[in-house]
Every structure is written in C-alpha cells, then in structure tokens.
Amino acid sequence: MQRTPLELLVSRLQQPIAPLRMTTIDYRDSRRDNLRPCILMVDDDGMTLAMLSSGVRKSGYEAWQASSAEAALQLIAQRKPDLAILDVEMPGMSGIELARCLRFGAGVPFIFLTSHDDDAMVGRALELGAVGYLVKPVDIRQVIPAIKAALSQSAEIARLLRAEAELDADLHLMQDQLIQADKLVSVGQLAAGIAQEIDEPMDCVQANVATLEHGMIKLFEALDALAARGRAGQAALHEIERAHELSFLREDMPALLAQTREGIRRVCRIVRELQDFSRVDALDRWQRVDLRHCLESTLQLLGSELRHKAELITEFGETPDIECLPGQVSQVIMNLLANALQAIGEAETGGRGRITIRSGSAGGQVWLEIEDNGCGIAPEHLKRIFHPFFTTRPAGTGTGLGLSLSCGIVQRHGGEIGVRSRLGEGAVFRVTLPQRQPQR
C-alpha cells in the first residue's frame, strides 16, 4: 500500500539515521536572524554543495548544508528553513521524495537541482510544486537570482494565504451573522404565534373576571338587603353565613380578585412584549425628530415611578435632529429606564437610587447614555444580556425581551448599543444613532 508523503516523512524521522556524510551547518549564524532568510542546500556532491553554500553566504543569506535527504529531514525537524535547493538524484531517499515531504509535511518551498534538462523533468518539477529549476553544472550567478525570485514568490504565496485566511474568517463571521439573523426571525415568528395563542383566551378570562367581580358585588348587596328585613331576614342571613362561610368570602374574595387581575395584567404585558418583539418594523414611520423630545415624553410617562425610586439627573448636550422611527426610539429609552429602575430596586443602596441621562453628538451621530447606581451586571452576563429571553431577574419578574428588542431597534436604525458595568456599582448603557439614514 502506497504511503502518503506525510506518513513517509514520519517513518523516515523514526528510523535510525546512519552516520551522515558532510552534514554541516553554519554555526556562526545558528541563531536565526529574521532579516536573513535561511537556505537549505541538499546534494550528495560535496563540490557542488560547497560552491552553493559559499555563494549563498556571500549573498547575505544563512546557509545550511546536508549531503543526504535524511540529514536534511533532521535539520528541518529542528528548525524550518525559508527555502530548500534539492538535488533530484541522491542515494537513499531521492530529492523527489524529499520534495513531497517538504511540500506536504513541512510547508517549505523548494528549487530542484538536476543534471537532466528535459520537458518531462520540468513537468514533474512543476507538478510537485517546485518554485524553481536549475540544471547542473550550476553557476552561482544563476543561483542567486533564482533564490531571490523563489523567496519573492514564496512571500507572495504567504501573503495570498494570509489574505485567504482573513477572507475565510470574514466569511465565517458573515455566516454566523446570517445564522443569528435566521434564528432571530424564527424566534420572532415563534413569539408572534405564542402571543396570538395567549391573547385570545386572555381576553375571555379578563372579561369573565370582570363579570365575576360585578356578580359578587351584587350578591353581597342582595344579602345585605336580606339582613335589613328585620329579625327573620337576619336569622336567614345568619344561617347562610354559618352554612357557607359567608364572612370568609366577604373578606377574601376582593383580595383574590385583585390577585387575579394582577396576574392577568402581567400576562397581557408579556403578550404585548412578544407582539412588539415580533413586529418591530410595523410600529412607526420614519421622521426627523429631536432625540430630547423622545427623552422628555418617555420621562413624563415614568414620572411618578422615577420620583419615588430615584433621583434623576439630566446632562443634555447639543443633539441635532435625527431621522428615526420615534415610537421605536422611545421604546428603547423606556426599556433602558425600566431596567435602570429595576437594578436600583435590587441594589442595597441604603436610600434612593440615582439615574443620570446624558446626550450629545459627534461625527454625524447622536448618542445617549443612561447610567444607574444599581446592582450592576456580572461579567459573565455582559455578552448575553442582549440575547432574546435572557434575563437575570427572578422567575416571573421579566421576559428577557426588553434589551433584545432595544438592540434590534438600534441596529435597524444603523446604530450601536453597548454597556459597561461593574457588579455592585451600577451600569451605563450607551446608544449611538446616525443623524441621517441611508437610502432604505
């Protein structure tokens, strides 16, 4: 069974090496200088090897010598040369076999050196990947230009390989982004389906709870009216209360109904967030607005809650009008402020929290920062907080869609959103939006 060149290289390295003939290395240059390329010369002819080494060294290169392919493999195992000049015909392992090992096992470019000048040999050399071809007897004045051309070609190949690697990395990144976008589309479709499935029965539940509450009020009014009809009515009411624990119902039913209404409200909020997440593009129309107007209108909506939980500090700089979807930008601000209030509520500040809002512009972009002195974000969570359905809040207190929705809105505007935080010291969210949108 024919072995691959790499297997051949490994087997050769594992075999005991016979005493080497004329295996020398220029020890004066044994400490490699990156400015001096290293040339390995392999030839069983001592005269040719000495002539090549002398000329290569005089031309400013580092010269290695080996009189057999086995000796060359030992040198390459210790350190990789920049170029190899190989005699085709050598006893033992031939230059052809060594060339295969250099190409596939070590990645070293090589020039062939042979006594045969025919088309078949040239074709075989090119097929093996040689970067040059020299015919004996060689003239050093021909060898040096060939070395320079080979090194230049090798450098160009290395540059192309690096460019190919960079392009491959970019393609992988684009592929990952497309996969992520596809996942978000799937998540959005799933969210829309779930929201629709929940929304219809919740409307029915909400209407039934309202009817039940109204009926309970009427029932208790009827019982009170019965008690007002003298002793007989009071006796009948007393019997009903004793048999059906009416006093318990009077005390607990209002609380139970209030808890039910709160549960319905939370479910409706989740449905609304799922619907918003699944149809961000359908919420608004593009307009030119002042970012501070979006800020102020959102602050008015949160006014009472902000006043009770935190001290609000505003540092508004010059902010030119931006082309945006105002409803969506306001939603981003609302989500970031709601997160800040939540973080303050979870922090042990020993008093009221603090929220600072800053805005400004630079380089054709408008930026907004919302900073809080709340509980902060753990380092391991910073890379995940914009993922759909990821939340650090306790179960039942958040859907994990607010920041993901905000991130999607900002990206659709051609902007960026980021966060910096230290656990226990608060967080700063920064949103940057372009003043003008490209052709949509």
Image: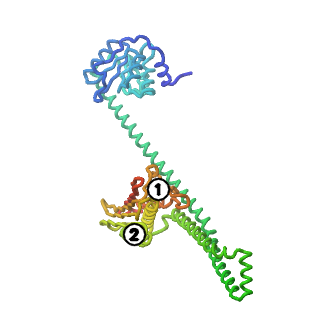
Q: Is mark 2 on a helix, strand or loop?
A: helix
Camera-side residue of 125 and 437:
437
Q: How many residues crowd around disc 1 within 10 Å: few (fewer than 14), some, or many (20 or more)?
A: many
In the rendered view, does 220 fall on the left or right side of 305? Answer: right
Res. 285 mark: none
Pointers 1 and 2 in contact (C-beta within 8 Å): no
Camera-side residue of 65 and 376:
376
Residue bearing the label numbered 1: 386
Residue 110 image point, x, y percent: 38, 25
In the rendered view, does 245 fall on the left or right side of 86? Answer: right
Residue 130 quadrant = top left
Tell me which residue sits at (37%, 28%) in the image: 131
Residue 108 quadrant = top left
Q: What element carries label 1?
A: loop
Q: Up-down: is 156 above or below 413?
A: above
Tell me which residue sits at (66%, 81%) in the image: 220
Camera-side residue of 161 and 201:
201
Residue 234 image point, x, y percent: 71, 84
Q: Which of marks 1 and 2 is nearer the N terminus?
A: 2
Tell me which residue sits at (45%, 26%) in the image: 105
Say whether residue 78 is visible.
yes
Disc 1/disc 2 C-alpha distance (Å):
22 Å
Quadrant of the image for the N terminus?
top right
Tell me which residue sits at (57%, 63%) in the image: 192
In the rendered view, does 208 fall on the left or right side of 426? Answer: right
Residue 431 image point, x, y percent: 38, 60
In the rendered view, does 41 fall on the left or right side of 202? Answer: left
Residue bearing the label numbered 2: 294
Residue type at tag 2:
Cys
Q: How many residues crowd around disc 2 within 10 Å: few (fewer than 14), some, or many (20 or more)?
A: some
